[in-house]
Image (cartoon, rainbow, N blue to C red):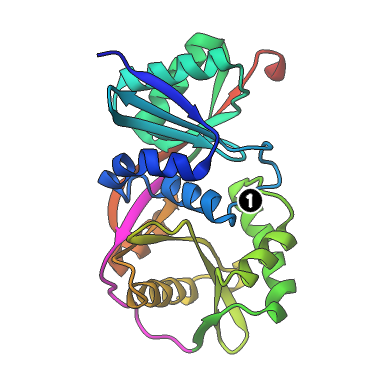
Amino acid sequence: MSLHVRALDDPDAFRAHVFPYLLQRECDNGLLIGMINGLCSGTEHDPQSPQRPLLYAVSDGDHVVAAAARHGWHLVLATETAEQIDALVYFLHTSGEPLPGVSGMSGSAGAFAKAWSARTGHFIEPGHSMRSYRLSSVMPPIEISGSFRPAQMSDLDLLAKWTGAFMEELDMHIGDPREEARKRIERGRFFVWCDPQPTCMAGIAGPTPNGIRINFVFTPPELRRRGYASTCVATLSQHLLDSGRKFVFLYAETDNATSNRIYQRMGYEFVGDWRDYQFRSRSETM
């Protein structure tokens, strides 16, 4: 049976249509699930996003077998086969929507990038290489001095500075650091470890039915290697589990051996490799 790709305009309708498929692998698809939930609740906002989110479902008869969405920078994939990827590539190319890049589990994202390049002639530029992890039980690190608390508006100047440094380190493009920090503090999405002043930060984003993602983990260089980030993330992870989440997930840069080792010691289990790819036209590379 041939595959059918459908573009939907309404996030609520898209969620109802694709969630039965996405939730079969909730952690693998956590980034996409969180994005969709944010669009439905109105909390998902990106200054660089198009006027409307781009939402795609791939069906085989009556059943959704793949999904993808873009709200801002890259298309985020939840696909499993070459046929699904080819169907999406063909549909997106013929629709004329610009596509600056793709993100997804390593195999799917890489296959999509190659198929897109073959159809459009665009060059592939590898982006972030991440490892995804999931935790359901925390193994606390060695106790250190200090305390954990939600970030407050009085922290804004400091966390705006840290947010900008975090974005620079990861080459992220998601708008003004101060505005990003302000929104996260207002929404209760930033937390800090204090000793007695804030020494590091960690954020939460993308809630799924059973889990939530930790992100924006940052310690200024002069305070690193003291255990602050490890303790902050472990405490935040336990806080989220205690609040009713069945699991917590996060992404760590593949080439950051220290972060990967720390997360695993904390109880985070490897889920899979995640890759970003950017697309460049021939004129952009000249």
Where residue 206 sits: x, y (%)? Answer: 47, 56
Of residues 245 and 222, the one drawn nearer to the viewer in this rendering: 245
**Residue at horizontal 44 percent and vertical 48 percent from the top:** 31
Q: Quadrant of the N terminus?
A: top left
Magenta residues span 130-145
Q: Tell me if residue 28 can be seen.
A: yes
Q: Which residue is mark 1?
A: 45
- Identify the main secondary structure in magenta: loop
Up/down of 71 relative to 269, above or below: above
Of residues 58 and 282, the one drawn nearer to the viewer in this rendering: 58
**Residue at horizontal 48 percent and vertical 71 percent from the top:** 229
Where residue 37 sits: x, y (%)? Answer: 47, 52
Q: Residues within 10 Å of mark 1 (few under 14, many from 20)?
A: few
Q: Quadrant of residue 272?
A: top left
* Left or right of residue 46, residue 278 in this image: left
Where residue 73 sits: x, y (%)? Answer: 60, 37
